Image (cartoon, rainbow, N blue to C red):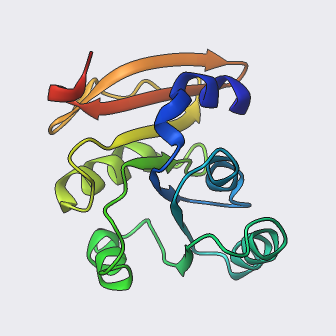
Amino acid sequence: MREALFSILGATVSGSHVLDLYAGTGSLGLDALSRGAASAVFVDRSPRALEIIRRNLSLCFPQVPATLLRLDLTGKSFPANLARNIPDAPRPDLVFLDPPYGKNLAETTLTLLEKSGLLASSAQVVVEERCTVTLPERFGRLSLHLSRRYGETRISMYKPEEDLD
């Protein structure tokens, strides 16, 4: 599934500023860095997950600008907390959103993120969710660009409406 996702994203990954929400092991953000992303911010509430990401970054990408943030993304104040912790970073133009399944977090998080003003004007947001979950086609200015099923997982990609082509 990850290989298919990055094939879809193609050259847009190179030079991008990545935001990996609910990062877990950081596999999506780390994969983006391996494909030429300029920087990455990894956000998770688990200290253990962040330590795994920190180790992998030091082994694979010691010179790449990366930030690790321990934040609980389930609260409505997460965009403000996120903005406060990365004020000087470029706005993310590639966002991975992979919340735990079965908690209805994808829709809430995407709504808050879109309203936050944190995203670059041409940001792409990739949401990974259980295949049985159908997300809305619009979140503010973000519109569903594509939706693909891979086994038990559905990948939904959102882009600003004016960037759809």
Instruction: Examine the image and state in which quarter residue 26 appears.
Output: bottom right
How far from the left and from the top, in percent, is residue 57? Answer: 74, 70
Q: Is residue 63 above or below residue 102?
A: below
Instruction: Examine the image and state in which quarter residue 3 appears.
Output: top right
How far from the left and from the top, in percent, is residue 65? Answer: 56, 73
- 131 sits left or right of 63 in the view: left
- Write the residue at 20% across / 61% down: 116
Q: Is residue 118 above or below residue 37?
A: below
Q: Is residue 131 above or below residue 80?
A: above
Q: Is residue 163 visible?
A: yes
Quarter of the figure with the C terminus: top left
Q: Nearer the viewer, residue 27 or 129?
A: 27
Q: Nearer the viewer, residue 96 or 105?
A: 96
Q: Nearer the viewer, residue 131 or 141?
A: 141
Q: Is residue 132 visible?
A: no
Instruction: Examine the image and state in which quarter residue 6 appears.
Output: top right
- Write the residue at 29% across / 55% down: 113
In this figure, what is the number of numbered marks? Answer: 0
Quarter of the figure with the N terminus: top right
Q: Nearer the viewer, residue 82 or 100?
A: 82
- Write the residue at 72% across / 52% down: 27
